Amino acid sequence: MKVLFINNLGGGYADHLHVQDGITVEQLFKQQLPGCKAEDYLIRVNRQPSARDQALQEGDRVSITPLKIDGAGA
């Protein structure tokens, strides 16, 4: 199945990914950002906050945005 993956980390990018049927948000996160902690990111599916165990559907739009941006002042 195909989903649109939007990574807003650093320069950011968007790409259509072919993923296995029934993949969850957490599994996709671990595949795309190995070694990162999901709690450090805002993860949305179709512009809505998502649960880690949410199963993705064909054509879903998944965006990952860091909660903290390095170098940003308080």
Image (cartoon, rainbow, N blue to C red):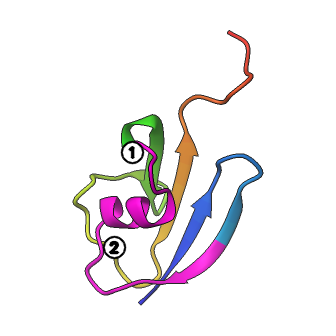
Q: Residue at x 65, y 30 (%)?
A: 69
Furthest residue in direction front, as rendered? 35
Q: Which residue is mark 2?
A: 56
Disc 1/disc 2 C-alpha distance (Å): 16 Å
Q: Which residue is mark 1?
A: 38
Highlighted range, magenta = 15-37
Tell how many labels.
2
Q: Secondary structure at mark 2?
A: loop
Q: Is residue 6 left or right of residue 22?
A: right
Q: Residue at x 34, y 62 (%)?
A: 25
Q: Residue 4 appears at what percent x and percent y?
A: 55, 74
Give the amino acid type for the residue marked by disc 1 in the picture: Ala
Q: Residue 5 appears at what percent x and percent y?
A: 56, 69
Q: Residue at x 39, y 45 (%)?
A: 38
Does the segment drawn in magenta span residue 30?
yes
Q: Is residue 2 left or right of residue 55?
A: right
Asked if 4 appears above or below 26 in the picture, the reply is below
Q: Quadrant of residue 73?
A: top right
